Structure formats: C-alpha cells, structure tokens
Amino acid sequence: MATDRKAEVTWRGDLLSGGGRVESVTSRALGGLDVSWPARTEEPSGLTSPEELIAAAHATCFSMAFSSGLAKEGHAPEELKTSATVTFQPGESREWTKTLSSRQRSRRRRTVRSRKHSPASRKSA
C-alpha cells in the first residue's frame, strides 16, 4: 500500500539573503526548522539544510532495510547506528554523492563501511 508524506516549507526573499522554514511534515514530528543559503554553503549556525534532511532520510531508510535483511538471515540486530553524509558543492548541481555507513550489534558483529552513489548508479538500482 502506497503512503504519501508531505512537508511544507516557506521561503522568503532571494536565494542569497532570504531564508526559509520547514513548517511541518505529515507526522508532525518535525517543524519549525529554519534554513538559509549560508547555512547550506557555510557554517550551519543552528540552521538545517536540504542535505542534512536527506542524510537523515538515507540513514533511516538504510537502517530499516539492513535490519530487515539481517533478520531474514537469522541475525536480527540489537542496535544499528547509521551515519549518512550528503555533500553539496555549490555550482556543481549535476553531481552528488552520499556516503552511508552503518554499525550494528547482534550475535555476530558486522560493519558496513561505506557506499557511494551517483545519479547514474542510482538510476540503475
């Protein structure tokens, strides 16, 4: 069954001097997250960025899938700690990479070091 998730964002002003706010998401678990171009390209100064939110989504999705795969093989993890990094390089919008790593604790210790994806490899997956 398909599910829809929605986020509402307000942006005011131009790109360089303006700012935005993630107002709400379907679950109401997030909201009131401020964003700006300087927070995206320089120091975050307490603000978030699209890349930070994408990294959180990737880490969460990977943890769910990895946990499921381990459990299906009889190695359900007690805990997974996953880190994802999304790199944004201003002026290079055609290319992006993410690095995803996960550590888990179960009866057997396994480590997934990192995986890098590009738009080309993503399309073929």
Image (cartoon, grey):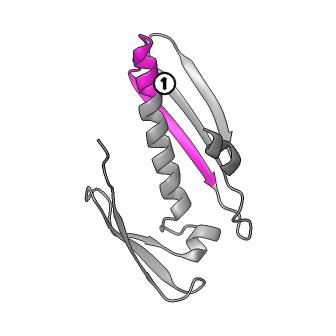
Residue 42 visible to the viewer: no
| Image position of 45 with respect to 74: above or below | below
For image coordinates 64% across by 30% down, the residue present is 113
For image coordinates 45% across by 40% down, the residue present is 61
Residue on which disc 1 sits: 104
Left or right, residue 109 beside residue 60: right
| Image position of 87 with respect to 67: above or below | below
Q: What residue type is labelled 1?
A: Gln
Residue 89 visible to the viewer: yes
Q: Which residue lies furthest to the left in this view?
A: 28
Name the one closer to the observer, 29 or 3.
Answer: 3
- Residue 67: in magenta span: yes
Q: In which quarter of the image is residue 1?
A: top left
Q: Where is residue 117 in the image (x, y as percent from the top left)?
A: 66, 43
Q: How crowded is mark 1: few (under 14 residues within 10 Å), some or many (20 or more)?
A: many
Say what secondary structure mark 1 lies in: strand
In which quadrant will I find the C terminus? top right
Q: Give the range drawn in magenta.
A: 66-86
**What number of labels is visible?**
1
Name the one closer to the observer, 47 or 116.
Answer: 116
Q: Where is residue 51 in the image (x, y as percent from the top left)?
A: 55, 59
